[in-house]
């Protein structure tokens, strides 16, 4: 695996080596966290998902409390999966992706349903990536895949470390390819990573999953 | 021991902890969202350097002072004045005209927390000239937040955001008319407090509070599991006059409730519902 310390921006091919998907990795859900630059990154990832991609995806994108449902509609339009706003008490279903609504935390119950709360901000954010990753890690244990993308703050680093502690697999966007490096950098510092790559590499990895 | 096993054991410990809290003090969190409760209790466990939830259970049984801490941890006291301005705009447009037809109005803010949303509604009613014939009940089970609500004193640094919310909500006057500013706090104007009664009421364990024309209960039900949600919605149904109005949080929904058939929708986006005039059939009246 490429280590983050290797600063080889010239070697595209090297970065694109996708590791063998570990034999035990059969994620029942994917959690994605991102902030500044996330709309563009999510657009690329969702566009590239292969038809029939069935693993449910839960997304926290930091977003203004007053924003409308544009991002949900946009991702739904360009993707092969059905993208919805996460609703309280919804059962998480295959072939679906759920986005945290503005100004609500998105939590995962251990019976694989969605819970929303209006608790205090965590890591200065609501929705918070830490809250999603932490609760999803407890619900899915080793059957969880986490992805940390571009962002200008450190939300997600704690959640990512919880995810790895519970046996989940963590992919972090290569900070040198991120719109803003802070979020992926902090995640790698605090949680380490199982795979660090650019958006194209993440897409290839996802599309190879069973 | 694996983290998965520890996770399972913690689930058992949390069940026992909530049972202890209920049996010893009567506070019932057993039907709250489990992910929420677990996150908050584990947070307290780490902050307080407890070796496990079981150690916290021992402390809560023997140390009544610790209960206040746990209540603050588990209850939700994040609120603001005119939170979700579009909701207040809809109340002004859709609900106030209905209320104006009544000679006397009773409203109930269930789970009022520190009172910001109660005072917001009082301001709106004042501007619509119905405050003087309205009795507002504002209830919470948490004495500490109820005390703050009664005082109506809030940090001054939040006023800028509240003013923006007020304007977005269609406020008709100058927001500064409704408070007196101090060095670092504001106190809500006494004329707004006159018709408000703050009282202790627990939605989970207490019964009908009063018969009212309007219930506002926003972002409380999301913390409950389905079963408890239905129980509380039944409590609201029984508390509303025929034609009475129920306002929920924007991500809460009556649609999946067993009692949905007794309501009609006033504003689907802002989650404003109206109790039908026909009486619910008695077959569903089981407590």
Image: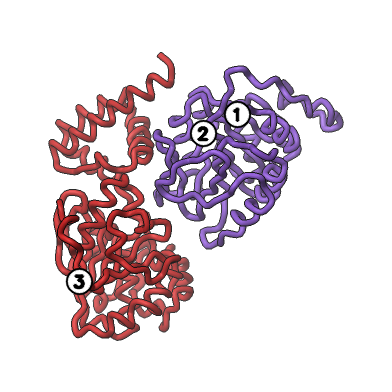
Chain colours: A purple, B red
**Chain letter behind tag 2:** A
Which residue is at the far right? Answer: A10
Please determine if labels 3 and 1 lie on a single subunit: no
> For mark 1, what is the residue?
A170
Mark 3 vs 1: CB contact within 8 A: no
Tell me the residue at 75%/38% (across/down).
Answer: A177
Give the letter of the chain under mark 3.
Answer: B
The foreground one among B139 and A20 is: A20
Q: Position of residue B96 (x, y in %)?
A: 33, 80
Q: Which residue is mark 2?
A: A158
Disc 2 on helix, strand or loop? helix
Residue B196 in sight in this render: no
Which image quarter: residue B118? bottom left
- Same chain for marks 3 and 2? no
* Residue at mark 3: B241
Mark 3 vs mark 2, foreground winner is 3
Q: Residue at x 35, y 65 (%)?
A: B185
Who's the residue at 31% across and 79% down the image?
Answer: B125
* x, y percent for residue B211: 16, 69
From mark 3 to mark 1, how far is it between C-alphas? 54 Å
Q: In this rendering, which labeled residue sits more in front, label 1 or label 2?
A: 1
In the rendered view, does B100 fall on the left or right side of B2? Answer: left
Query: Between residues A29 and B3, which one lies in front from this camera angle?
Result: A29
Categorize mark 2 by other alpha carbons within 10 Å: few (<14), some (14-19), many (20+).
Answer: some
Front residue (pair B127, A106): A106
Task: Residue B133: give its label.
Answer: none
Q: From the viewer's perspective, is residue A157 above or below residue B176?
A: above
Q: Give the Cα separation between the discs numbered 1 and 2.
A: 12 Å
* Kind of element beneath mark 1: strand
Label 1 close to label 2 by CB (< 8 Å): no
Q: Secondary structure at mark 3?
A: strand
């Amino acid at each position: 695996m490429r280590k983050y310390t290797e600063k080889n921006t010239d070697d595209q091919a090297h970065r694109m080596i996708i590791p063998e998907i570990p034999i035990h990795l059969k994620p029942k859900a994917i959690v994605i966290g991102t902030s500044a630059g996330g709309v563009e990154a999510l657009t690329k990832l969702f566009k590239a998902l292969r038809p029939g991609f069935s693993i449910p995806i839960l997304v926290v994108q930091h977003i203004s409390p007053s924003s409308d449902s544009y991002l949900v509609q946009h991702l739904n339009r360009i993707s092969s999966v059905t993208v919805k706003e996460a609703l309280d008490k919804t059962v998480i279903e295959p072939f679906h992706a759920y986005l945290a609504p503005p100004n609500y935390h998105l939590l995962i119950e251990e019976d694989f349903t969605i819970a929303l709360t209006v608790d205090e901000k965590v890591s200065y954010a609501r929705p918070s990536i830490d809250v999603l990753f932490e609760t999803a890690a407890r619900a899915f244990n080793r059957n969880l895949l986490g992805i940390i993308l571009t962002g200008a703050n450190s939300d997600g680093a704690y959640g990512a470390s919880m995810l790895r502690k519970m046996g989940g697999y963590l992919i972090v966007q290569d900070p040198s390819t991120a719109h803003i490096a802070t979020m992926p950098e902090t995640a790698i510092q605090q949680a380490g990573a199982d795979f660090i790559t650019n958006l194209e590499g993440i897409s290839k990895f996802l599309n190879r999953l069973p | 021991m694996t983290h998965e096993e520890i996770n399972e054991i913690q689930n058992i410990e949390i069940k026992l902890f909530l049972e202890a809290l209920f049996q010893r003090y009567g506070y019932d969190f057993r039907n709250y969202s489990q992910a929420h409760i677990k996150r908050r209790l584990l947070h307290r466990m780490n902050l307080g350097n407890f070796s496990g939830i079981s150690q916290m259970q021992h402390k809560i049984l023997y140390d009544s002072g610790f209960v206040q801490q746990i209540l603050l941890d588990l209850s939700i006291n994040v609120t603001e004045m005119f939170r979700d301005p579009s909701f207040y705009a809809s109340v002004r447009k859709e609900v106030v005209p209905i209320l104006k037809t009544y000679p006397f109005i009773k409203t109930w803010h269930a789970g009022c927390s520190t009172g910001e949303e109660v005072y917001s509604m009082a301001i709106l009613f004042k501007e619509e000239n119905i405050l003087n014939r309205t009795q507002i009940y504002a209830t919470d089970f948490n004495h500490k937040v109820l005390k703050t609500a009664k005082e109506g004193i809030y940090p001054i640094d939040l006023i800028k955001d509240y003013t923006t919310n007020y304007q977005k909500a269609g406020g008709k006057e100058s927001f500064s008319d409704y408070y007196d500013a101090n060095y670092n706090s504001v106190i809500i104007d006494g004329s707004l407090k006159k018709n408000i009664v703050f009282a202790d009421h627990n939605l989970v364990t207490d019964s009908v509070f009063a018969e009212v024309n309007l219930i506002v209960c926003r972002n409380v039900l999301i913390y409950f599991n389905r079963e408890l949600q239905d129980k509380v919605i039944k409590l609201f149904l029984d508390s509303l006059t025929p034609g009475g109005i129920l306002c929920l949080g924007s991500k809460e929904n009556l649609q999946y409730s067993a009692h949905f058939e007794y309501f009609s929708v006033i504003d689907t986006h802002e989650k404003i519902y109206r109790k039908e005039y026909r009486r619910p059939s008695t077959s569903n009246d089981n407590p």
